């Protein structure tokens, strides 16, 4: 059965990741102020199976969506997992890689 509560340690990890992302967004805006109004918006979802998925006994899933134009390969990314921690782990892997790329870019433009 899918876990439907967010553990406070996982929530704190999420907030730390969000803070690091916001720092990188701020650095981008200090160089060039062009951006989208949704920079860094996270949506966290807990999706229950629909009627047909329920018949197939599919589990509910957690999702994390990030809308971000300045950091990352596209304007929006999604990560899913059986628990919030699973989805967060996937998001951390990708976002931390983007932040490393951002640091390299920042060093080249400054």
Image (cartoon, rainbow, N blue to C red):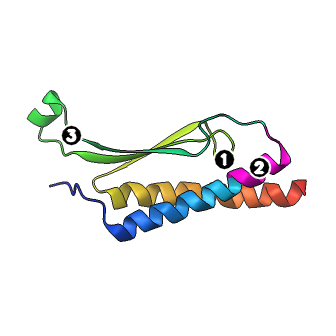
Give the labeled residue for mark 2: 28
Where residue 100 appears, as percent x and y from the top left, is 69, 61
* Secondary structure found at label 2: helix
Q: Quadrant of the N terminus?
A: bottom left
Q: Residue at x 88, y 57 (%)?
A: 108
Q: Residue at x 66, y 47 (%)?
A: 71
Q: Is residue 35 left or right of residue 86?
A: right
Q: Earlier in the sequence, mark 2 or mark 3?
A: 2
Residue span colored magenta: 25-33
- Residue 16, compared with residue 45, is above or below; it is below
Where residue 18 appears, as percent x and y from the top left, is 55, 57
Q: Nearer the viewer, mark 2 or mark 1?
A: 2
Q: Which mark is residue 48?
A: 3
Q: CA distance from mark 2 to mark 1?
A: 9 Å
Q: Residue at x 49, y 61 (%)?
A: 15
Asked if labels 1 and 3 touch by Cβ distance under 8 angstroms, the answer is no
Asked if labels 3 and 2 touch by Cβ distance under 8 angstroms, the answer is no
Q: How many marks?
A: 3
Q: Which mark is residue 12?
A: none
Is residue 30 one of those drawn in magenta? yes
Q: Is residue 91 left or right of residue 72?
A: left
Residue 2: which quarter of the image? Answer: bottom left
Q: Which mark is residue 71?
A: 1
Q: Is residue 28 left or right of residue 40?
A: right
Asked if labels 1 and 2 touch by Cβ distance under 8 angstroms, the answer is yes
């Amino acid at each position: 059965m899918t876990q439907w509560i967010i553990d406070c340690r996982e929530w704190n990890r999420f907030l730390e990741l969000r803070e690091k992302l916001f720092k990188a967004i701020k650095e981008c805006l200090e160089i060039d102020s062009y951006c989208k109004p949704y920079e860094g918006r996270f949506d966290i979802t807990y999706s229950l199976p629909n009627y047909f998925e329920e018949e197939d006994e599919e589990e509910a899933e957690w999702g994390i969506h990030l809308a971000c134009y300045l950091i990352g390969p596209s304007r929006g990314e999604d990560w899913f997992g059986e628990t919030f921690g699973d989805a967060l782990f996937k998001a951390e892997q990708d976002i931390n890689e983007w932040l490393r790329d951002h640091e390299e870019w920042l060093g080249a433009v400054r």
